[in-house]
Image (cartoon, rainbow, N blue to C red):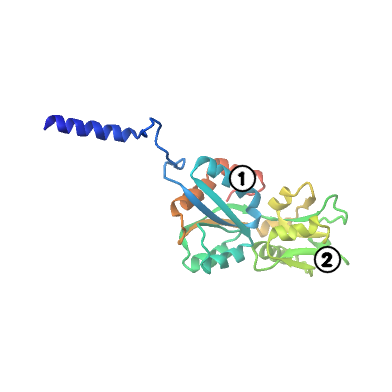
Amino acid sequence: MKKILTALALAALLAGCGNNSDGSPPSTSTSSAGGGVTGNLTVLAAASLTETFNQIGKDFEAANPGVKVTFSYGGSSGLAQQITSGAPADVFASASPATMKTVTDAGDASGTPATFVKNQLVIAVPKGNPKGITGLSDLTRAGMKVALCAEQVPCGAAAKKALGAAGVKLTPVTLEQDVKSALSKVKLGEVDAALVYRTDAKAAAPEVDSIEFPESSGAINEYPIVTLKSAPNPVAATAFVAFVQTGPEMKVLTDAGFQKP
């Protein structure tokens, strides 16, 4: 009986070593924190996070070889509506607490959203600033063509607040559904200026110049992120939300012009 027990114990020990039949170690996929992170991960994120999240997604996949991250970028208000309408996704990163509230009020968030960065507006103008714009009041000059984000979009809400603080009233020639669309109007030469996030103007620095203005400090947007309640891959979602807030990934964000919360 003793020999049988000894044999069983030895078998259990060998099994615990985890070698495959060919002598190689077992195939595993875990996060840097040791959690078994595998499968597909879908992240809905504000358009202004495009460049940084693309990099963070690559970093996350490198840290977790069993994961494939897919991003869907757009205006935060539209993404929130997709989530509350049942669109399958694991993580939501919004450009404002107001749009995140749409998701939390609907009961579609898992846990409390965490604010991970902040962002503020600049005036984006064509390279060389041909119209000599120095502040918001210049946007009201005769013949000036300006693009803004629509008010329901976080960058539009921030623009409205900044313009109100400056006592400036203007009629934009276009209202866009996300900040990238507003910025593209400047890059294409269709408008003389647009109010966009500092990070987007910085990413487009080869094509546009950015003009800082003091009123933007009173219209700073906080960016919350959360795991979604109906996440198809909740383990990977939770790991990604935590990963975004680690030191190296925060550096990716701050190098792009985002501010720490």
Kindly identify which residue carries mark 1: 55
In front: 13, or 111?
Answer: 13
In front: 80, or 223?
Answer: 80
Using the rendered view, name the quadrant where residue 55 is placed.
Answer: top right
Kindly identify which residue carries mark 2: 140
The picture places residue 198, in percent across and down from the top left corner, at: 70, 52
Provide the secondary structure element on which disc 1 rests: helix
Using the rendered view, name the quadrant where residue 255 is placed.
Answer: top right
Are there few (<14), some (14-19), or many (20+) residues within 10 Å of tag 1? some
Vertical placement of residue 97 versus 12, above or below: below
Residue at left offset 46%, top offset 57%:
232
**Residue at mark 1 to residue at mark 2: CA–CA distance:** 38 Å
Q: Earlier in the sequence, mark 1 or mark 2?
A: 1
Are the residues tagged 1 and 2 within 8 Å (C-beta)?
no
The picture places residue 207, in percent across and down from the top left corner, at: 79, 49
Vertical placement of residue 249 versus 177, above or below: above
Residue at left offset 62%, top offset 57%:
73
Q: Is residue 154 visible in the rendered structure shown here?
A: yes
Provide the secondary structure element on which disc 2 rests: helix
Tell me which amino acid carries mark 2: Thr
Between tags 1 and 2, which lies in front? 1
The picture places residue 100, in percent across and down from the top left corner, at: 55, 63
Name, please, the residue furthest toward the front: 22
Q: Is residue 215 visible in the rendered structure shown here?
A: no
Name, please, the residue furthest toward the left: 1
Q: How many marks?
A: 2
* Label disc, if present, on residue 184 of the rendered structure: none
In front: 135, or 206?
Answer: 206
The picture places residue 156, in percent across and down from the top left corner, at: 69, 64
In front: 91, or 89?
Answer: 89
Tell me which amino acid carries mark 1: Gln
